[in-house]
Image: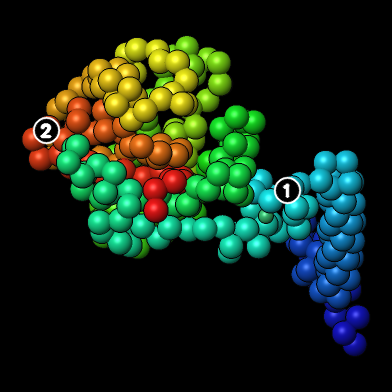
């Protein structure tokens, strides 16, 4: 009966010259076609998944990914740091503690609203290895990742969360050409992804090229850096909270030179963050 009825519908529609869809003719046919398509789709997505898995395995075989801090082989879901390092690297938590050792570096020198660094830098330690991979071996993903992770933590501190601009310590053009990237800017980019503050790289610039600063006393460094930075537009920072960022804070003298350029601008306050510090 049902078959006959459907056939008569088909005939009458054909006779009337009307357009009709397959589903109007026979829903059973459509369901069969749909399930065939679905099966085909499922089959292809399974094949794609297998191919993707094989490619990833091959990539792992030829290009295994290693933790940038401890050099252990990373698992597929791990990124930049292995789970162990992510938990065990020495975090300072200075952002939660006013009057912390990084803030103390600036006491008596310049006005800092808040200062902190993510990791404690120990000579020969994993943090040093991590920073070395980033700064000197050019693995920029390290700076971006640490910035992003740290930015999330800084948003839990009222002293940092309201920053308006993230301003990386600039490199001289010559140094930038040599290295190919500014490590502070990469770290700042990561921070800006997790914070409300905007990355700002045009205002503060380095006027003078300085040679490497290792093995110099704080006073020598201070003399060296005091007049090497400048601002293009002081008005821009009026009433703003500026977050100066660097990769590592050691003596704080480079930061100090930049802070002094901003601290007296009307209504401006300056804070400081770095990936790591030796100050404890
Ligand atoms: Zn590790």
**Residue 36 located left or right of residue 9:** right
Q: What SS does tag 2 mark?
A: loop
Query: Does the beta carbon of the residue at mark 1 sit less than 8 Å from ligand 1?
Result: yes
Is residue 193 something one can see in this rendering? no
Q: Nearer the viewer, residue 42 or 138?
A: 138
Residue placed most toward the observer, 270 or 224: 224
Image-quadrant location for residue 9: bottom right
Where residue 120 sits: x, y (%)?
Answer: 47, 52
Mark 2 Cα within 10 Å, few/some/many (few <14, many 20+)? some
Q: Position of residue 161 (x, y in %)?
A: 30, 55
Residue found at the very far left of the displayed protein: 266
Residue beneath disc 2:
264
Which of pointers 2 and 1 indicates the residue nearer the eye? 1
Residue 107 shown left or right of residue 150 in the figure: left
Which residue is disc 1 drawn over? 71
Q: Position of residue 18 (x, y in %)?
A: 74, 58
Q: Going from the N terminus, do you reach mark 2 or mark 1 first?
A: 1
Structural crowding at the residue carrying mark 1, measured as other residues with C-alpha within 10 Å and reported as few (<14), some (14–19) or many (≥20) = some
| Cα distance between the residues tagged 2 and 1 | 45 Å
Count of marks overlaid on the render: 2
- Note whether 263 is above or below 197 in the view shown: above
Residue at x 66% of width, y 46% of height: 68
Classify mark 1: helix, strand or loop: loop
Residue 231 to residue 272: above or below: above
The residue at the far bottom in this view is 1
Q: Residue at x 29, y 53 (%)?
A: 160
**Residue at image point 45% right, 39% down:** 248
Residue 3: in sight, yes or no?
Answer: yes
Q: Give the residue at x 37% y 28%.
A: 217
Question: Where ligand 1 lies, by quadrant?
Answer: bottom right
């Amino acid at each position: 009966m049902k078959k006959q009825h459907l056939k008569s519908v088909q005939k009458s529609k054909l006779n009337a010259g009307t357009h009709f869809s397959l589903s109007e003719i026979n829903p059973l046919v459509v369901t069969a076609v749909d399930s065939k398509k679905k099966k085909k789709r499922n089959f292809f997505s399974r094949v794609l998944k297998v191919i993707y898995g094989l490619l990833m395995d091959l990539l792992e075989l030829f290009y295994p990914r290693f933790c940038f801090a401890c050099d252990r082989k990373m698992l597929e879901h791990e990124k930049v740091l292995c789970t162990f390092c992510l938990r065990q690297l020495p975090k300072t938590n200075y952002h939660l503690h006013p009057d912390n050792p990084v803030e103390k570096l600036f006491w008596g020198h310049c006005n800092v609203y808040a200062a902190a660094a993510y990791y404690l830098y120990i000579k020969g330690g994993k943090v040093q290895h991590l920073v070395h991979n980033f700064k000197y071996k050019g693995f920029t993903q390290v700076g971006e990742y640490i910035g992003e992770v740290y930015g999330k933590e800084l948003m839990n501190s009222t002293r940092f969360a309201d920053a308006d601009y993230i301003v990386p310590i600039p490199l001289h053009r010559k140094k930038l050409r040599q290295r190919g990237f500014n490590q502070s800017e990469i770290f700042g980019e990561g921070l800006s992804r997790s914070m409300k503050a905007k990355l700002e790289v045009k205002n503060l610039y380095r006027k003078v090229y300085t040679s490497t600063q290792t093995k110099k006393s704080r006073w020598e460094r201070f003399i060296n850096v005091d007049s090497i930075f400048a601002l293009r537009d002081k008005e821009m920072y009026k009433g703003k909270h500026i977050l100066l960022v660097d990769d590592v804070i050691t003596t704080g003298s480079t930061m100090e030179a930049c802070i002094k350029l901003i601290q007296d601008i009307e209504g401006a306050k300056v804070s400081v963050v770095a990936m790591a510090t030796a100050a404890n």
